[in-house]
């Protein structure tokens, strides 16, 4: 079935219900002075939710989101929701931008014009891209998988089908962070004939069999992070529906679960809003709340753990660029990444964290342009 035009429109009744639920939130107590060390900071989440109830203007943001051409297209039985923005240049290069959790296609919003219309930002018309920005299956306003098995391998195949069969791009690039980086890497391995290059700001790679002292220090730092910061992954990877029943009922609960990750993984001076405004945080949250996708999105962790090809595959020989942001919790040394990827560009950036497309759209866009000049 060919792509069908689609615009996001949340019914008024959903917005009325949201405000009602926020008003009736039953707030827990918190240890005095807890800050963010027990998880989400109660005072900040209350402040954010009050703004969500009384000040946040979804209709304004909905109109901004719909400025970009949106579509639905069935692939492997699931309707994929995506933006498809044509580039302004002599030969725009097709590029698939893939988000992760707890993000959405909104993560790329502030990069779109930089990549499709580079002349307007001081760049060259020859660097323009045709952008395809799909929601992961089960995320946002697209379709939800209704059967088991939608792991990384199946998502990668569906996205390749979208690009080649439905949109007619026989050769294209991929880019992503978080799950988007994992899926981009899988596509570069399993669908290498189609992929001109992969650009990642999230890399999964094991340490060498015979680690150096520097490697052992990196392993120790990784193990500390894994022990203290990955409970969310274990829950969503084992019993996601037990958690997401509550998140689907309580917008405050959903906000706490998601916003704590922006606080913990983003690059900010302790004040979350120095990097992410309330409107940015809430617009991203609306991709989970309004279409009721908290449950269907969390299951990517469960399915990925049961997908033998999700993380294990031959070395990626497709040219690969890596942008390393200093506050990315999962960053690995280049020597580790080179065991798994054909690294042709590796750049360590001065600022930015896990949500690089939202935090540093100019820096990430520049890296994407520079890398894809080598493979266009």
Image (cartoon, rainbow, N blue to C red):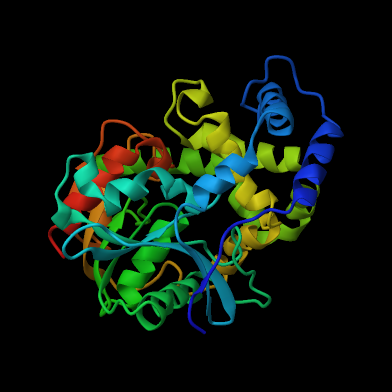
Of residue 32 and residue 253, the one placed in the foreground of this image is 253
Of residue 63 and residue 240, the one placed in the foreground of this image is 63
Where residue 159 appears, x then y in whole percent? Answer: 43, 73
Q: Residue at x 34, y 40 (%)?
A: 361
Q: Quadrant of the C terminus?
A: bottom left
Q: Is residue 372 left or right of residue 199?
A: left
Where residue 112 appears, x then y in whole percent? Answer: 36, 50
Figure check: 183 above or below 292: below
Q: Residue at x 31, y 73 (%)?
A: 189
Q: Is residue 164 left or right of residue 89?
A: right
Of residue 68 and residue 290, the one placed in the foreground of this image is 68
Where residue 356 appears, x then y in whole percent? Answer: 38, 41
Q: Is residue 119 visible?
A: yes
Figure check: 363 above or below 2: above
Q: Residue at x 61, y 51 (%)?
A: 287
Q: Is residue 208 left or right of residue 82?
A: left
For residue 37, which quarter of the picture?
top right
Q: How many marks?
A: 0
Q: Residue at x 47, y 52 (%)?
A: 67
Of residue 371 and residue 353, the one placed in the foreground of this image is 371
For residue 91, which quarter of the picture?
bottom left
Q: Is residue 344 visible?
A: no
Where residue 27 appears, x then y in whole percent? Answer: 82, 29
Figure check: 146 above or below 63: below
Q: Is residue 120 left or right of residue 281?
A: left
């Amino acid at each position: 079935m060919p792509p069908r035009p689609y615009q996001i429109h949340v019914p008024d009744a959903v917005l009325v219900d949201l405000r009602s639920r926020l008003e009736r939130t039953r707030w827990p107590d918190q240890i005095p002075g807890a800050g963010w060390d027990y998880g989400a900071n109660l005072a900040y989440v209350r402040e954010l939710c009050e703004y969500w109830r009384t000040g946040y203007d979804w209709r304004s943001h909905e109109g901004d989101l719909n400025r970009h051409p949106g579509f639905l297209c069935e692939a492997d039985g699931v309707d994929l929701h995506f933006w498809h923005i044509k580039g302004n240049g002599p030969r725009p290069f097709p590029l698939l931008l893939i988000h992760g959790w707890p993000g959405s296609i909104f993560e790329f919003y502030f990069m779109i014009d930089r990549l499709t219309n580079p002349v307007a930002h001081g760049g060259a018309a020859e660097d323009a891209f045709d952008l395809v920005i799909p929601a992961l299956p089960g995320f946002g306003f697209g379709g939800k998988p209704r059967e088991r098995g939608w792991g990384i391998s199946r998502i990668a195949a569906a996205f390749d089908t979208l690009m080649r069969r439905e949109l007619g791009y026989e050769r294209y690039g991929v880019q992503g962070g978080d799950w988007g980086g994992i899926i981009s890497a899988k596509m570069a391995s399993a669908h290498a004939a189609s992929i001109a290059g992969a650009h990642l700001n999230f890399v999964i790679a094991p340490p060498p069999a015979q680690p150096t002292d520097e490697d052992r220090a990196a392993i120790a730092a990784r193990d500390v992070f894994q022990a203290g910061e990955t409970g969310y992954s274990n829950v969503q990877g084992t019993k996601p529906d037990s958690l997401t029943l509550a998140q689907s009922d309580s917008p405050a609960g959903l906000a706490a679960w998601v916003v704590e990750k922006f606080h913990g993984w983003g690059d900010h001076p302790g004040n979350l809003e120095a990097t992410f405004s309330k409107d940015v945080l809430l617009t991203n949250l609306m991709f989970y709340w309004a279409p009721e996708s908290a449950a269907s999105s969390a299951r990517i962790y469960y399915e990925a753990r049961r997908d033998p090809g999700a993380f294990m595959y031959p070395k990626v020989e497709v040219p690969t660029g890596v942008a390393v942001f200093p506050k990315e919790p999962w960053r690995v040394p280049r020597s580790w990444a080179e065991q798994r990827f054909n690294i042709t560009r590796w750049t360590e950036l001065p600022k930015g964290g896990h949500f690089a497309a939202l935090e540093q759209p100019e820096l990430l866009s520049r890296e994407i342009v520079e890398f894809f000049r080598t493979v266009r």
